[in-house]
Image (spheres, rainbow, N blue to C red):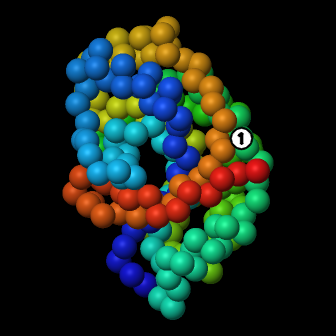
């Protein structure tokens, strides 16, 4: 097993990214940046996990993962977020998020990806998979408790609901764990 970490995510489209950048600007929330093309700083990019962080098992390669992902067929998924919430005491501090409302289709995709990749991968935190899988879009990290209510009110009044179609999943590879930066390895478009 390699020590390189991978994640499969859905990335919100550019209009949603711009809405969230506006929130961060209004409340002076500063997050990491990257200028390299096809790199995501997940603390700064509206995203949600399809398959949480994993390693590739010994005897398999990144190409094997990509080929397995290519076999996945799934229809586009409507994503609607109408409620903001907060995860407290995470390793990133308090995380403000928009909860994905009806996520049965997303859970189906999550299960399918997990099953397809099961023999090739080792999940880093298996307890965060099915039982604790809470589809959400992270909006701000390390948020002080004092800032939560005004930011949540603004998001509830001015931003939510967020609606878009998930039409692709993205395989990301860590290249700088310190900055939480990941590079796009493969994008798989849904039917």
Using the image as rendered, state which of residue 190 and residue 89 is in the foreground: 190
Using the image as rendered, state which of residue 146 and residue 182 is in the foreground: 182
Q: Residue at x 33, y 47 (%)?
A: 41
Q: Is residue 60 visible?
A: yes
Numbered marks: total: 1
Q: Residue at x 70, y 51 (%)?
A: 190
Residue extending farthest bottom: 59
Q: Residue at x 53, y 86 (%)?
A: 60
Task: Say which quadrant the N terminus sits in.
Answer: bottom left
Residue 147 horizontal/vertical position (percent):
28, 18
**16 over 122 or under it: above or below:** above
Q: Is residue 127 visible?
A: no
**122 over 95 or under it: above or below:** below
Does residue 33 appear left or right of residue 70 in this picture? left
The residue tagged 1 is 77
Residue extending farthest top: 157
How would you rate the neighbour count of disc 1 (Cα within 10 Å): few for under 14, some for 14-19, many for 20 or more? some
Q: Residue at x 62, y 80 (%)?
A: 119
Residue 75 horizontal/vertical position (percent):
77, 48
Using the image as rendered, state which of residue 143 and residue 109 is in the foreground: 109
Residue 106 horizontal/vertical position (percent):
68, 46
Q: Secondary structure at mark 1?
A: strand
Residue 150 horizontal/vertical position (percent):
35, 11
Does residue 111 appear left or right of residue 147 in this picture? right
Does residue 175 appear left or right of residue 63 in this picture? left
């Amino acid at each position: 097993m390699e020590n390189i970490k991978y994640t499969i995510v859905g990335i919100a489209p550019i209009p949603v990214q711009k809405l969230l950048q506006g929130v961060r600007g209004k409340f002076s929330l500063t997050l990491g940046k990257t200028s390299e093309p096809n790199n995501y700083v997940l603390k700064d990019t509206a995203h949600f996990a399809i398959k949480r962080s994993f390693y590739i098992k010994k005897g398999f390669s990144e190409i094997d993962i990509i080929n397995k992902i290519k076999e996945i067929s799934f229809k586009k998924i409507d994503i609607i977020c109408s409620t903001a919430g907060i995860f407290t005491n995470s390793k990133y501090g308090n995380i403000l998020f928009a909860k994905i409302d009806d996520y049965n289709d997303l859970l189906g995709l999550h299960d399918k990806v997990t099953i397809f990749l099961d023999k090739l991968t080792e999940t880093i935190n298996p307890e965060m998979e099915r039982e604790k899988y809470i589809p959400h879009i992270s909006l701000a990290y390390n948020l002080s408790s004092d800032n939560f209510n005004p930011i949540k009110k603004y998001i509830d009044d001015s931003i939510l609901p967020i609606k878009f179609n998930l039409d692709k999943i993205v395989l990301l590879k860590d290249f700088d764990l310190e900055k939480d930066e990941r590079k796009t390895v493969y994008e798989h478009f849904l039917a």
